[in-house]
Image (cartoon, grey):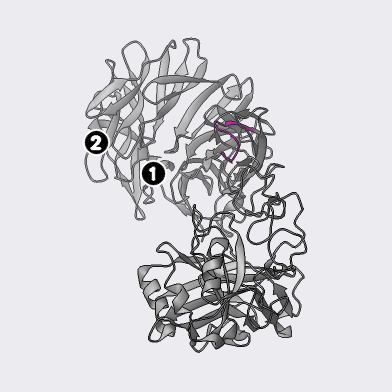
Amino acid sequence: MYRQKTAGVVCVLCLVGSVSGCGWMFPLGPEADDSYLGVNLSDLGPVKVIRVSQDATRTQSTVISLPSDLIQSAPDDAVLILSVADLNVAVDESSSRGKSTDYEFLALITFRFAFSGDPCNSNTKIGPFEISIANGKLNLPFISLPLTTEVRQALANGLVELCTEAWANFNGKIGIGRICIEFGNPPPEPEKVVLCHIPPGNPDKAFTITVAASAVDAHLAHGDYLGPCNGDDPAGDQDPNDVDPTDADGDGVPDSVDQCPNTPADEAADDNGCSCSQRDQDGDGVSDCDDLCPDTPEGTDVDAAGCPIMAADAGPDVTVTEIGMVTLHGAAQWGTEPYTYSWSAPGWEGSNQQDPVVMPAETATYTLTVTDWSFPPQTATDTVTVTVKKADGLRFTVTNLGANGGNSSFAFGINDLGDVVGYYYTSTWQKRAFLHSNGVMTDLGTLGGTEAFARDISNAGKIVGESKNAAGQWRAFIRGKTTAMRDLGALGGTSSVAYAVNESGDVVGYADTGAAYHAFLYTGGTMTSLGTLSYALSGAFDINDTGTIVGVYALSGGARKAFVHDGALVDLGSPLLGESTAWCVNNDGLIAGYSWGGSEYRSFLYANGTVIDLGALDGLPKTYVYALGETGQVVGASTTADGSLSHAFLFAGGEMNDLNDMLEPGHAWDYLTTAYAINSNGQIAGYGQIGGENRAFLLTPMK
């Protein structure tokens, strides 16, 4: 059984227990007024019991008789209040069994009321208001209702019908005491006097009321007397000089309604009998006397002055399936703006941006430190973890694409439809471009010469590569799946090579200028040189759908450096080792390539100045990246130090994987040599050996 005495204000009509009068609850107006009134309707009978459970319950309506002679004198801006002074809550044993001491029992109560008709179906309601019990403490909210013209007129008729609805997270009972109504506009610190009001012509219907001191004489002149009704007059003689003796702490609030019975003598109390050192209106643990921030949201950490402590927010943890660019999101609350942000992580140089872009090579935790503009400044920290999910259990089926009746075949490009392009050798060892689509390999023809090589195919079916023309010159071409090759020309010389095409039909490669080879962009029917900066030669190897191009520069002596072109040429230098080439770029701007120095060859991912070494397969130390998927997966080849053996690899989930170890059981391949292309569905194209012959393959992830 929980039983708690309280005088906390809860809503418009008040549920109270046996108190000697209706005490003023809060200031209702800025100026002194003698129209304040508190009425204790003590004749309504015993405590009203509501049975509560997890199923909503509804009581029968209750008719309340109001003192209409007093209500008619209420001011126009009066507010009607409901307060609770005596509340009993009983929780059935079955509901409390096994609950911890801090378990919160909760009940929601709604009062529907009507001045005539059925209140249970009325749209005029108060609530729901919440009664909660945790750690033995009962808590109640506050609600008030303006005394509108409609309500005033209805109250003046003297009858109100109530219907109570209740729900709880426990089975039990709620006992609600007698109803008390308060309304009026007393001054902020009014003098209050308890009177027994004698209705004219109805002395047996007396009510205990509380009025402003300035109204006492008028009430006494009409037959009211000082002190409560029902024989509770201290002296029993209705002496107007009697005073209420039950105020133990001397704060001016009778003990019967005093919520804070031990108010310090040197502190002023409010109408509930509480001083500022006894109040904590925002519940932050700092009394109102000391609280410089009295409206702190619930649950916020505060300092000794009751003000929110600055908090940093690094955002929710992130899980990615592949290595790629991840944007961190920093934020702060409270403190003094503007904020400064600082990010750090082991092995990372850090950032002072609010939302930096990172590319973790493996699962990593990033720490955000925020500093505000106060003096001395506040600091706060928070962390976020980026988890790189491993590619465990990934397996592929393998399809032999054949050689179109020739000696061998090699796949170099694939689109999202699974169409594959490359070249095969005829029986006379001539190189011929092919398209493999829907299980059929088709020869793509030439530009009039004897040989051709297809390197890339877009989702729109645009195929690019190079072919010999009738003069025996190698020229870049573009064609559709069913249309003829078109010569893209050169840059003043006689030859050109096309490496990649995007979904807009833009083509990149390199072409002869007559004096050197320059990287080119072919768009809108025109081939344009991308230049060489201070280098002698350049070549472009890939272009994404936003127009970012990557490739390589070469000095006249042969040294090479990677570049990116995104409206202008940018030298990427040499990630990892002394020389490098950027081989591919996806639509997120992630770049893949390989770097070398001495006898070492290493593959890398690059974004925003961050370089990640992809590592190597056991026993195959040299790695060469050839393709980068939209999800961040990378394919290529790893070889022995002397280049005598090559295995195709897949970099996924932050790890190097030998594709030969990821094939379906029972395949007939000797080994997969090199992977040259990967699409958005995870299909991979390249070539390997089967029965001692080189053949183009297509790998498809197994479901």
Q: Does the magenta stretch include residue 663?
A: no
Q: How far apart are marks 2 and 1 (CA)?
A: 22 Å
In this rendering, the answer to whether 672 lies above or below 507 is below
Q: Quadrant of residue 257?
A: bottom right
Amino acid type at image mark 2: Met
Mark nearest the camera among 2 and 1 is 2
What is the number of the mark on residue 450? Answer: none
Amino acid type at image mark 1: Gly
In this rendering, the answer to whether 590 lies above or below 105 is above
In the depicted view, which residue is nearer to us: 54 or 172?
Answer: 172
Q: Which residue is identified by label 1?
A: 406
In the depicted view, which residue is nearer to us: 459 or 431?
Answer: 459
In the depicted view, which residue is nearer to us: 276 or 74?
Answer: 74
User: Do we see residue 449 in this rendering?
Assistant: yes
Q: Which residue is identified by label 2?
A: 485
Q: Quadrant of residue 647?
A: top right
Q: Give the range drawn in magenta.
A: 331-343
